[in-house]
Each structure stands twice: as C-alpha cells, then as structure tokens.
Amino acid sequence: MPHQHTPAPVDVFSWIDEAELARQEAGLVRTLRPRPAHSPLLDLASNDYLGLSRHPETVRGASEAAERWGAGATGSRLVTGTTELHAELERELAAFCGFEAALVLSSGYAANLAAVTALSDRGTLVVSDAGNHASIVDGCRLSRAETAVVPHSDPDAARKTLAAHRGRALLVTDSVFSVDGDAAPLAAHAEACREQGAALLVDDAHGLGVLGEGGRGALHAAGLAGAPGVVATLTLSKSLGSQGGAVLGPAKVIRHLVNTARTFIFDTGLAPAATGAALAALRLLEREPERADRARAVAAELYGRLTASGLTAARPDAAVVSVRAPSASAALRWAADCREAGLSVGCFRPPSVPDGISRLRLTARADLTGAEISRAVETILGTAPAGATDH
C-alpha cells in the first residue's frame, strides 16, 4: 500500500500574527490588567462619577438582592428573568429621569443596540453623529437602515440630512461624548427633529448623575425628558456604580422594545445583585443631589489647573476631562508613567478616537478630595511627555 503523505498543519490564524505586529508598530496594543480588590492607585480612570460603586448602601443593595433573588436572573426576561426588583428599578428610574416608562437590559451596549434596531428598519433613515459611541455605530449597522453620518455636534447638517429624506427617520446622538466630554446640542437637535417629523434617540450614559437637576440627566436639563418623540438610553455602570443599561421613553416605545428588541428578548436578564445595587444608588442620588454638582466642579477644577499649566484639554461639559497627547505611543507612556506614580488614568488611542488624536481621559469623581485633586494634577504635569504642553 503506497505511503500516504500527511500534509503539514496549516496555521489558519497566521494572519493574526501580522495584525498584532502592525498594532505593536503603531503603538496600539491593548492589554488586560487585573486590578486587586483594593488598589493603591488614585482612580481617575473609571466611570464611577459619583463614587457610588463602593458606597455601603450600593454594596448592601447588591448583597441583599443576591441573598433574596439568587446569583443570576436565571433566564431571558420574557421567561423567568424578570423579578419584582427589575420592575421596581424601571419605575423609579423612569420617574427620576422624567420619562413615562423604562426597560432595563444587561448593559448599556445592549440598550443602544435594542433602541436603534427596534426603532428603525430598511426604510428608515438613521442620522448619526460622527462622534457617537461604538454601540450606536453597531446598532446602526445591525438595523439595516440607511445610515447617514453627519459632522460632530452639527444640528444644521442633521437638519439638512433629515429634510432630504422622505419617510421615517431617527436622529441618534450621545448626550455627552466619551472622548472629549463635550455635550451635544440637544435642544437644536430636537428642534430639527420636530421640523422634519423625526424621532430623537439620545444616549445619556455620561449625563445621568452629572447633568440636570440633581443628576437627572442631559435630557432633563434640556427640557426634553418625557417629550413624545424622544427616547433615551443610559447605563447603570457609571454614575450608579453598578452594571446594566436601560431604555427610557413613551410607554408604547417600551412595549415595542419588549416585543422586538433582540438584545432584550434573547439575552439573560440583568443579575439581581446589579439591579439591587443600581436601585440603591439611584435612591442615594435622590437624597444627595449635590453629588452631581460636585462631579462637575471637580471636572472644572481639573481642567482649569491643567490648562493653566500649558496642557491642551477639552473644556468639560460633564465629568470627563480629556487631555491631548502628542502621539499614541506618547499617550501610552504617559498613562504608564502616571500609573507608576500612583495615579490611574484612561488612555484613548485610535481606533477609539474618531479624530485620530490620542488622549488621557480623566474621570472627575464627586468623592475626590482637594488633596487628591492636587495630587492628580501634580502627577499628570510631572509625567507629561515632550510636546504635551503649549508653553
């Protein structure tokens, strides 16, 4: 019997090696860094804007919910995954933010996918801001709708794009953009939508807990909460210190999502512990509305002191302070040097930044003390790379 030659095994993932090398050469490699339960670093990197993730009431809300309802939701919310606790959070969240109804999902990402895909179809025009979060971008792709990307925070461009379309239309934007921390012109966007008969969908992930009366969000601040043509999405993982997401709007919109949104229908419900923590944090914010004012004040102080020392930063409209770096590699080294000096900061590089400019991203937490703010400023200035200051 003739000898059968066994072909050499083929590495079907060899292309990954080439992609990884390209990332290394561009300074764009990302790595996971597990943190200990109690880090010695001063945290200006997380999205814990109000300092509630470790607040005793938030933690107790999580533990009590887990004790009562179990570790997991046990199924899709349309099967066994909806508890009385979910319904309670939805009622209180909608009332706090000024909307008729709310629907809680497993993440803010899932909430954006749900809202965009459920409110559009092949015949819909979706007008999307160029600076929108990746979850909105992915929602637009999955919706199969015609998507028009308009210049960042340009309501005139949005209006013209809507006016050129005949049929159903949806304008979608972040309320506060995660890269530079600037706020969208929501009033002007809403006016354009009213003129053209379009719906307005706003991701208020970075506005809840920071903007509006007592932290009720950017839509509340703009007088748009509860408006008939307006829908909001948000996350429970930032100001509320928990995990999960939600869609808020007219009751008929929420009923529509329950029946059509795939990231709601086919996903396991939000875990009881996260639900209980978010509810406890929401109630705490209602009792302590000054936390929202404090977060904005800390952001303003960080911005003022850093720019006065020559760094280039975007003026914050909420709790995000973005400081520009000379390059992606310089931003990476800067963040690493800050970490070595005891300060944790975010590092945004392409493709996370739409304009290709790398940045340090600082979180202005409401629970930062004056001494911690000074320490953060001194560390950032002391580790700044060449070319980061303008004088």
Image (cartoon, rainbow, N blue to C red):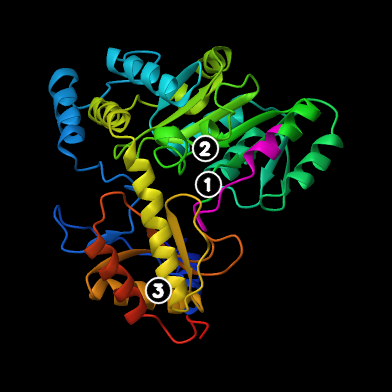
Q: Which mark is residue 176?
A: 1
Measured in 3D between alpha carbons, the distance from the residue under mark 1 to the one under mark 3, in whole angstroms, is 24 Å
Direction from residue 167 to residue 93 in the image, left or right: left
Residue 120 drawn in magenta = no
Residue 319 position within the rendered picture, expressed as x and y whole percent measured from the top left: 42, 51
Task: Count residues near mark 2 (Cα–Cα under 10 Å), then give few for <14, some for 14-19, many for 20+.
Answer: many
Mark toward the viewer: 1 or 3: 1
Q: Is residue 81 visible?
A: no
Labels 1 and 3: the sequence-earlier one: 1
Q: Secondary structure at mark 2?
A: helix
Residue 232 position within the rendered picture, expressed as x and y whole percent measured from the top left: 53, 30
Q: Secondary structure at mark 3?
A: helix
Which residue shows up at 28% across the image and 68% down it? 374
- CB of mark 1 within 8 Å of CB of mark 3? no
For the N terminus, the quadrant is bottom left
How many numbered marks, from 0 up?
3
Magenta-drawn segment: 178-190
Which residue shows up at 75% across the image and 27% down it? 194
* Residue kind at label 1, given as amino acid type: Val
- The residue nearer to you, when weighing 354 against 12, is 354
- CB of mark 1 within 8 Å of CB of mark 2? yes
Which residue shows up at 14% across the image and 52% down it? 37
Whether 253 is drawn above or below 35: the answer is above
Direction from residue 335 to residue 114 in the image, left or right: right
Kindly report the secondary structure that dominates the magenta region of the rendered protein: loop
Direction from residue 187 to residue 82 in the image, left or right: left
Task: Count residues near mark 3 (Cα–Cα under 10 Å), then give few for <14, some for 14-19, many for 20+.
Answer: many
Whether 196 is drawn above or below 293: the answer is above
Residue under pointer 2 = 218
Measured in 3D between alpha carbons, the distance from the residue under mark 1 to the one under mark 2, in whole angstroms, is 8 Å
Q: Which mark is residue 332?
A: 3
Labels 1 and 2: the sequence-earlier one: 1
